Amino acid sequence: MKSLKSFSFFFVLLIPLTVEAVSRSFPVVQLRPLYSRFSPDGDGVQDFLSVEVNVKSGRNIEITDWQLSIYGPSGLVRTYTPDRRIRKSGFFGSSKATPLPAFFYWNGRDEKGQRQADGRYRLELRVTHDYNAIERFSSKEVWIETTLPEVQLSPARLYVLRPALADGKIGQPTGEILIDQTQKRSRPNVSYTGRIVNTEGKAVETRHWKDTLPPRVAWNGMIGGDPAPVGVYRYELEWRDMAGNRRAVAVHQLLVLAAARPPANMLFTEAYYVNPASMYAPAKSLSVGFTGVSRPSSLLLRLREGSTFGGSAGWKSIRSLNTTAGANLTALSIFPENSLPGLYELRPTGDSVAPVYLMLDTKRPELSLNLSSSRYRPGEVFRIRPTYKDASPLYQYRLRLLVVTGKERSMLREWKGDLLPDEIQWNGDTDVDHDIAAGEELLFEFEATDAAGHTTVLRSSPVRTDVRFAARERDSIDLIADLSLTDFAADSFASEANTLIEQIYREWSDLDGYSVRVRVFVSFQGEEEENLLRSEALARRIRDALVQKGIPDKSVVFRGEGETDLVSEAADEYSEYRNNRVRVELLHKP
């Protein structure tokens, strides 16, 4: 019986060892760019590439290392490597696994911050496993495309006619409005949309083209099988590609006239939306010219009060303008002071004439900004949703990212364009040599100019930045974070400073075997000795706050660095230093 029990015990132990030895499978990793083409040109649409990383766990095989490399036409452009920090992993000690991030973000620049040229790029992810150090690869191709074909619109015929009938009504449209579309070059993956738009801003006819444009577009004055009402229309052309590039142009003063014969005399202007406080709109100068058989001696300015265009019903006469003094007219000479906003008709006197129509806009655009948060952690994606409301369409927008330092505001980044995105995403990169530090105050400044020339500027509420520890250098397990000095300068810490202290403590408590070093840089011109004392005292106070929060006394050291005058020496060994800041270092203890 004794020997039988021993044999049974041995048999029970043998089975799980045998099963475990043969049960292995590798993790499966896939790269999935959210779009294959992007345009890092600062217009707010697909300015950076988001790459999702899908990982299907293996059995008894872990990922121990990885490297993402981006290659362009001239070779290696940029490399991403793991975060080597050593985290706590429960009761049994620290974790040595090397997890892949859920997303990579690439702003189309190399390691030095230089923008890369248009072309094809390859993303290559190399993954190393703990089973015989086997490596596996996953790759994807993406394209940078920042240019679009150029298109110019030229009106070849500006009107269609609707002749009068015997019963007092007007007949079917005759003739066609013709717009020449000159495309300087074409390329694939570009979609074009042309629209005929009425006075109320509604598209009454829409056409689509792919890759190439017809050299001429014609409109016969019909809307869904019915004659278009007499009035003024415009033709809008918008084109875009898969990389997020967008452009738009328009031709105004397209007329459906209640007439049987072409007009012998016509006014002409490229403008439509105008501003009485300015001699021109930003898109087109308001210069009204004349073509025809006989020059009219005067023009009649009328304001539309109803919905009709023909005759005098629904129109209010405003003034008569003498045209003998000069060939052209401007907004200041056309509109009297305190003119009401609305649609105006400028009509020559006499028969067989064609007027022009001007939309007078007297108000500035209404703007709003919706931010994804009042705080920002560098390296993550921040979302800005701008909105625009105005009687005139947008001519141009600018969105500026500002950093506040005392009473000064410095611009870190700018987005601009003539088509406003629904949402602008920012992943922390800047247009200048400035690394976002914790505790900084950021502002977003939204400026928009409408087609009539009015400009509105709106500033957001402040956004405060959080602590983010990064590797001291590539593949280092030691970490650093820079903090703004602003909220630490007073005798007692501001609430924002205490928030940053709490964030530092949480980062430290998540790590295994790290000490803390606090370094403070202070610079007041001409006070070198005082700066050293100030920095020493502030470093001690920050150290005491971290100890009070829960970091052991022996694990925190501090040092006041005073100031350095080598900030501008880019190639100098001290170039990493910047005055008036706090640097916190998390150093792994061997």
Image (cartoon, grey):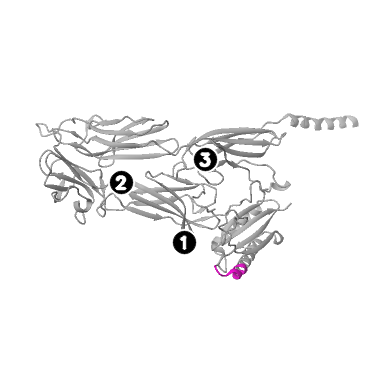
Mark 2 / mark 3, whichever is N-terminal: 3
Identify which amino acid the numbered label 1 is placed on.
Glu
**Left of 256 or right of it: where is 516?**
right
Q: Quadrant of residue 7?
A: top right
In-front residue for pair 574/385: 574
Q: In the rendered view, would you say 167 is above or below 465?
A: above
- Residue at which label 2 appears: 283
Mark in front: 2 vs 3: 2
Query: Where is residue 384 shown, x and y percent of the image?
Result: 45, 48
Which amino acid does the dot numbered 2 rest on?
A: Ala
| Residue at the spot 52% in from the left edge and 45% down from the top edge | 114
- In the image shown, does 304 or 276 lie closer to the viewer? 276
- SS assignment at label 1: strand
Say which quarter of the image contains residue 105: top right
The residue where tag 1 is placed is: 408
Count of marks overlaid on the render: 3
Contact (Cβ within 8 Å) of mark 2 with mark 1: no
Q: Nearer the viewer, residue 193 or 14?
A: 193
Residue at 66% x, 42% y: name it.
Answer: 98
- Where is residue 426? Give x, y as percent: 49, 47
Q: Which residues are magenta?
A: 525-533
Q: Is 542 situated left or right of 240 in this image?
A: right
- Magenta span main SS: helix
Q: Which residue is mark 3?
A: 50
The residue carrying pointer 3 sits among few (fewer than 14), some (14 to 19) or many (20 or more) residues within 10 Å by Cα, namely many
> Eyeballing the image, is 251 above or below 360?
above
Q: Which structural element holds mark 3?
A: strand
Q: Is residue 360 visible?
A: yes
